[in-house]
Amino acid sequence: MAGRGGVSGGKWDGNIPPECKPNPSILRLSAQLGWEEAQEPLHADIDVGKGKTCGVGPGGIANEVVRAKGSAIGVVGLVPCAVGGTRIGEWARGTRLYTELVRRASDSVKEGGIIRAILWYQGESDTVNKADAERYKGNLERLITDLRSDLNNPNLPVIQVALASGEGQFIERVRKAQLETKLANVKCVDAMGLRLEPDHLHLTTISEVHLGIKLATSFLASYGHQL
């Protein structure tokens, strides 16, 4: 979700496809909790751990939604919170990552606006250990339930992404958990088949564009009438 499209050898190639170009109607919440015009890499000041380089991610969902809905939608705000290379257990309620996610999400609407959906693309690190893979479904459902509670939105839509790759051998176990999650207002978009970078782990830039379109299509089909 943080986006490694176009990243090779620890460097981003700077290529921003037309589907992800900045638009005055699309803003992002910076690490300093200020709104600014969104531009790739959306997570440049969020996913800043040692040795990490951010590139293009699936943020093109916003461009696709604006394109589809036109001026009727007004301003779209993106709230990047992803940290790559993390297991879902590191996002459980009470952890630093969870607390920061809730803080940023809550701050994004303190002066108005509505959280329309949470986008969740994670799980490659949970494919390494069988126990992590087997616990994934329960951890995901608990995370969604906790977020809805702490954000005071019991019906908050969640659109998750089924893995296209993984760091270990239990990819199918995690994918099965993602695809079989049956909580209300939880949709799943499948990334399998999208082209990967040479590291065989992260999506290429064009794949991130396609994923953004998939996410937008799912969102608009289910919730577009609410905009």
Image (tube, rainbow, N blue to C red):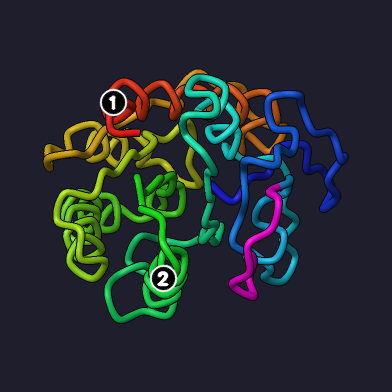
Residue 203 rendering spot, x and y as whole percentages: 61, 33
Q: Is residue 33 left or right of residue 143?
A: right
Above or below, comparing residue 150 to residue 64 in the picture: below
On the image, numbered disc 2 is attached to which residue?
Answer: 110
Helix, strand or loop at disc 2?
loop
Q: Quadrant of the C terminus?
A: top left
Q: Is residue 172 left or right of residue 44?
A: left
In the image, what residue occupies the spot 44% across and 29% down?
215
Above or below, comparing residue 37 to residue 74 in the picture: below
Q: Is residue 37 magenta?
A: yes
In the image, what residue occupies the spot 73% across and 45% down?
40
Q: CA distance from mark 2 to mark 1?
A: 24 Å
Q: Quadrant of residue 102?
A: bottom left
The numbered disc on residue 225 is 1
Residue 125 rendering spot, x and y as whole percentages: 45, 54
Q: Is residue 185 left or right of residue 164?
A: left
Instruction: Judge by depth and name the residue closer to the eye, 158 or 123.
Output: 158
The numbered disc on residue 173 is none
Q: Residues within 10 Å of mark 2 (few under 14, many from 20)?
A: few
Helix, strand or loop at disc 1?
helix
Instruction: Judge by depth and name the residue closer to the eye, 70 or 123.
Output: 70
The segment highlighted magenta reads: 30-38
Closer to the chain start, of discs 2 and 1, is 2
Q: Residues within 10 Å of mark 1 (few under 14, many from 20)?
A: few
Q: Callout 2, which amino acid?
A: Lys
Q: Callout 1, which amino acid?
A: His
Residue 189 rendering spot, x and y as whole percentages: 36, 28
Q: Quadrant of residue 116?
A: top left
Q: Main secondary structure of the magenta part?
A: loop
Q: Is residue 63 magenta?
A: no
Instruction: Judge by depth and name the residue closer to the eye, 224 or 208.
Output: 224
